[in-house]
Image: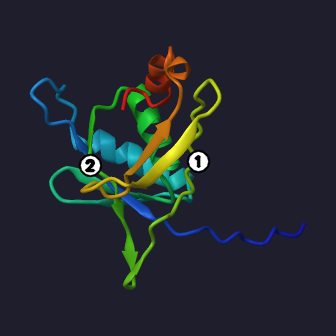
Amino acid sequence: MTALPTVELDPPAISMTFGVNDSPLAALDGSQEIGDRLLAEAATNLAINVIPGLVESYEVQRRGELQLGILLENMRRENFELSVFLPRVMIVKGVKLEPIEEVTIEHFLTGDRVEVTDMGPVAGNFGGTRMTLTCPSRGLVGYNSVFSSDTHGT
């Protein structure tokens, strides 16, 4: 029997800090259970690194947001109470390992004569884009609920 060649995994690019839920309504779970769960995940999942941090916290390094979201959802379903901090881009040997995503937004206004008249960055909002469109009023009837649903209210 011949062993298969090893596969090189991409290094983690995003880091999040997981900690004990310290809100006033939190249960009395300690960080030991959270740490044990994260270390067990790291033992079976090669795409994750877990580094114990300061004061009941753990730095979790993964390749992308989806992997972190799946881990968080699984832990939530297992009744873990966590506080999670915003993701941070990892810097290794002076190089930023920030993943860049391609984003495509498709919103369909009904009716003809819909035109994009302007598009550019939102002032003071890094990464935001403002689009200005013109369309007949009849094309906007009922669109507010569709748009709100598509963007989850944001």
Measure the C-alpha gap from mark 1 to mark 2.
27 Å
Q: Which numbered circle lies on residue 85?
A: 2
Give residue 36's position: percent from left, percent from top. Answer: 36, 45
Answer few, some or many: residues within 10 Å of disc 2's Cα (few below 14, many 20 plus, some between 14 and 19).
few
Between 75 and 44, the one lying in front of the other is 75
Question: Which quadrant does the C terminus fall into?
Answer: top left
Between 54 and 32, the one lying in front of the other is 54
Q: Which residue is drawn at 81% across and 68% down?
A: 4
Give residue 99's position: percent from left, percent from top. Answer: 50, 64
First in sequence: mark 1 or mark 2? 2
> From the viewer's perspective, is 68 left or right of 86?
right
Give residue 48's position: percent from left, percent from top. Answer: 48, 57
The quadrant in which residue 110 appears is top right
CB of mark 1 within 8 Å of CB of mark 2? no
Q: How many labels does the image show?
A: 2
Give residue 97's position: percent from left, percent from top. Answer: 45, 72
For mark 1, what is the residue? Answer: 104
Q: Residue at x 33, y 53 (%)?
A: 122
Q: Residue furthest right?
A: 1
Answer few, some or many: residues within 10 Å of disc 1's Cα (few below 14, many 20 plus, some between 14 and 19).
few
